[in-house]
Structures are given as C-alpha cells and as structure tokens.
Amino acid sequence: MKIEFVKKITDYLHLNMFEITYSDTNGREKIWSFASRNDPPKCVSGHFETPDAVVIVPYHTDKKQLVIIKEFRVPLGDYQYGFPAGLVDAGETIETSVIRELKEETGLVMTQINRLSPPIYSSSGMTDESIVMAYVDCSGEVSNEGNTSSEDIETIFVSPDEARELCCNSQIKCDVKTWLVLSVYGETGRVNW
C-alpha cells in the first residue's frame, strides 16, 4: 500500500476533508476520503508524534469519584457522556492543555498527572486525529464559568455503582473511550493507571 496523491477538499480552520489516492496491495489505484486537523494530513507529513487533542480522565480526590461530563454534541443532536477534552493549542504542552481544558469545562483544578498515553487514534477510518488520554487527580468545585457559548456541559461525579449503571444504559449516548474507562471503574472500583 502506498500513498500516491493528496487533494484538499475543504479549507476550514480546525478540520478539513482530504481525498487520498493510494495503491492497494494489488497495485490498483483507489481513493479514500477522510478528515484531518492537519495540513498536510499525517499520512503525508509523517508527523504522528504530536497529538491533536487531550482527553482527561479526572478522579476527584476529595469526593473519591470519577468525573465525567454530559455535553451537547452537534453531530449527534443530543447529549453525550464523555470526559473533558479539547484541542492542544499551538505551542502548548500536553500538561498545560490538560490543566486548561479541565478548568474550562468543569471548573475543577488538576492536582496531579498520574499517567499519559502516547498519541492514540479512535476512528482511523474517518480521521487521522490523535489524542492523549491523561489520567489525573483533581479537586475543587464544579463551575461552568469557563464554558463558551457553544458548550453546554454538565459535570457529573460517578461512583463505581453509577459507572456500571451508565455502561448498561442503552438509552444514553456514550463516548467509546469513556465507556471503556467506566466499565473498568464499575467492575474494579479503580481508575486503571
């Protein structure tokens, strides 16, 4: 398999569509369309080391509970259960992005980073977007003061029993990464870092 040619289809600030012409294993030319936050996309630039975003798995050390959010997501036209997350700004470290996004979305303060994943991919058939999952301890009180007008976020503290209930609830929409963490937390009572 070999990338032959890339064509940018859209020209937006944070996300664009690309059409990649590639050769398959039989040497036939094929086309694949996907979204990327990078121009050129990572399959062309080879810059896979820098993540596009962070996903924060916060554990509130005073309440002894996992923190999740319920946020309106436009592509779903509904609310989704997930973790605080956001893009890594230009020139920003992963740690700085984690601190900023957690505070903006929940009002909580990160007190310690317990574990950072390498850049990982959640939907590589549709995008080259990579994230770092940051398992952190946090403290403080919930606030929506840092939310922008395009964010509708509710912060929720979750016990292991509540995590198990959420994982079995087919009536809610849940982010895949969040479901996996909640599943482990619900079964073990631990955030696995």
Image (cartoon, rainbow, N blue to C red):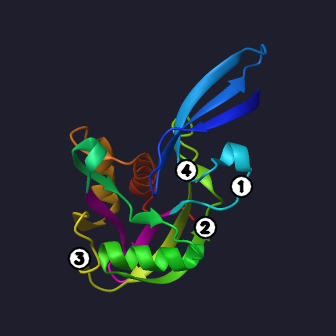
Q: Nearer the viewer, mark 2 or mark 1?
A: 1
Task: Identify the image quadrant of residue 133.
Answer: bottom right
Residue located at (73% from left, 14% from top): 28
- Give the residue at mark 4: 129
- Closer to the chain start, of discs 1 and 4, is 1
Query: Which amino acid lies under the numbered mark 2 shown in the image of this protein?
Result: Leu
Element assignment for label 4: loop
First along the sequence among labels 2 and 4: 2
Describe residue 149's horizontal placement relative to residue 117 as left or right: left
Horizontal arrangement in the rendering, residue 101 relative to residue 25 (left or right): left
Q: What residue type is disc 1 on?
A: His
Mark 2 and mark 1: span between their CA atoms?
19 Å
- How packed mark 4 is, by other alpha carbons closer than 10 Å (few <14, some 14-19, many 20 or more), is many
Going 70% across and 59% down the picture, which residue do you hit?
49
Picture quadrant where residue 103 is located? bottom left
Tag nearer the camera, 2 or 4: 4
- Whether 63 is among the magenta residues is yes
Residue 9 forms part of the magenta stretch = no
* CA gap, disc 1 and disc 3: 35 Å
Name the residue that disc number 3 marks: 144
Q: Amino acid at mark 3?
A: Asn
Residue drawn 35% across and 60% down? 160
| Tag of residue 47 | 1
Give SS at disc 3: loop
* Foreground pick, 140 / 43: 43
Kindly report which numbered mark, 1 or 3, lies closer to the viewer in this rendering: 1
The stretch of residues the image draws in magenta is 54-71
Q: Are marks 2 and 4 in contact (CB under 8 Å)?
A: no
Between label 2 and label 3, give the one nearer the viewer.
3
Q: Secondary structure at mark 1?
A: loop
Q: Secondary structure at mark 2?
A: strand
